[in-house]
Image (cartoon, rainbow, N blue to C red):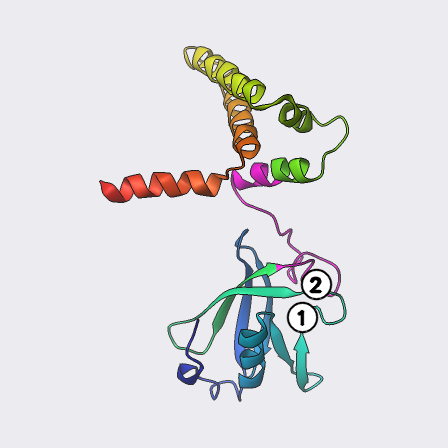
Amino acid sequence: MIDITKLDFKKSEGLIPCIVQDANTRVVLMLGYMNEEALTKTLSEKRLTFFSRTKKRLWTKGETSGNFLNLLDVTADCDNDTLLFKVNPTGPSCHTGADTCFNEKNEELGINFLETIIQERKNNPKEGSYTNQLLNSGINKVAQKVGEEAVELVIEAKDNNKELFLGEAADLMYHYQVLLAAKGFSLKEVVAVLKSRHLKK
């Protein structure tokens, strides 16, 4: 991942600031500090371990709460004196119980938030959920709904009613993502196809 020998631990008296980011949502979870020993342990165990400046010892995030920060990737900045960790958190990152140490919600930005909700319904069905009703109706029914919503969007596109047009656009986007979930695919895979097409041009 990184070459420890190239890192500058001397600038901050043996410690390096570590920015921790959720690899999926890109939300910054916390800031911690590592000495060389903590970094070595982190890279070996694939779980973030920091150096506590108050207790003067190593501590693995989640060692008491169980809310570990599982390491996916780490990169150094241009001066080799700060690290960016991309992680998969198993729970809230702040000791207060908040998602992040900056009291922000750790959730997907953009259209990905909808995919997260749909996948949650698929994995943990909720009684009365329209999403679960759709998923349980089978691929043919879900695909049919996508077709119906596409037609309705085309019809609204011919008029100048902003509210109705955006409403139909939202309906189509929702049903399209339900279809992806029903087929076992993700938006990330669709984006990968689009990117590959772009690179070929």
Label 1 amino acid?
Lys
Residue for point 66% across, 63% down: 101
**x then y, percent, for residue 108:** 56, 46
Mark positioned earlier in the residue sequence (2 or 1): 1
Residue for point 63% across, 27% down: 135
Q: Which residue is mark 1?
A: 61
| Residue 98 magenta-highlighted | yes
Give left or right: position of 146 versus 48.
Answer: left
Give left or right: position of 195 versus 75.
Answer: left
Residue 2 seen in the current view: yes
**x then y, percent, for residue 57:** 67, 85
Q: Which residue is mark 2?
A: 67
Secondary structure character of the magenta stretch overall: loop
154 lies above or below 67: above
Query: What's the magenta region?
Result: 89-116
Residue for point 55% across, 25% down: 175
**x then y, percent, for residue 16:** 52, 79
Q: Residue furthest left?
A: 201
162 lies above or below 59: above
Displayed quadrant of residue 116: top right
Q: Check contact, mark 2 vs mark 1: CB within 8 A.
A: yes
Displayed quadrant of residue 63: bottom right
Which quarter shows the N terminus?
Answer: bottom left
